[in-house]
Image: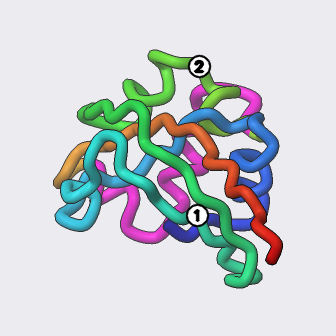
Amino acid sequence: MKLDSIYFNYIKSGKKEYETRIYDEKRQKIKLLEEVIFTEKENEKNTFTAIITELSYFKNFKEAIEEVGVKKVLPNAKSLKEAIKIYESFPTYKEGAKKYGVLRMKFVLVKHKKYSN
């Protein structure tokens, strides 16, 4: 799952607890307890792995954000109104939310052990 650097770093640091996406055909395949790889858009060598621990479905971004609070979804947003505006500024998100609804995911980061020979 690709993320802008700001959100990639927020998730990695634990400031962003939820990722919210359009519940389109691609996202409808996501399963609870599935392992996903998050990739930083600006530097695709930067990745980390997480396990989906919660999947919730909503009619729109307002409902998806409001239930858990703005700071857990978009730590850089100052208000619910601003958070919705940020999501709706992403290409196809405003129309996609109306058509498919919104998926909110919570996850835990996976710590990989390093092995040496």
In the image, residue 81 sits, relative to residue 26, either above or below, namely above
Q: Dot 1 lies on which element?
A: strand
Q: Which residue is at a point 63% across and 26% down the rendered structure image?
A: 70
Sort mark 2 into few (<14), some (14-19) or many (20+) by Cα contacts within 10 Å. Answer: some
Q: Is residue 10 left or right of residue 49?
A: right
Which quadrant, please, contains the C terminus?
Answer: bottom right
Task: Say if residue 82 shows up in the picture.
Answer: no
For residue 113: magenta? no
Q: CA distance from mark 2 to mark 1?
A: 22 Å
Disc number placed over residue 14 in the picture, else none: none
Q: Dot 2 lies on which element?
A: loop
Type of amino acid under label 2: Gly
Q: Taken as a whole, is the magenta stretch helix, strand or loop?
A: helix
Task: Say if residue 2 shows up in the picture.
Answer: yes
Q: Which residue is at a point 64% across and 28% down the rendered structure image?
A: 72
Looking at the picture, tell me which residue is in the foreground, 57 or 116.
Answer: 116
> How many labels, in total?
2
For residue 91: magenta? yes
Type of amino acid under label 1: Phe
Residue with the mark numbered 2: 69
Whole-percent x, y for residue 2 in the image = 55, 70
Residue with the mark numbered 1: 38
Q: Which residue is at a point 55% across and 50% down the rendered structure image?
A: 50
Q: Which residues are magenta?
A: 77-97
Sort mark 1 into few (<14), some (14-19) or many (20+) by Cα contacts within 10 Å. Answer: some
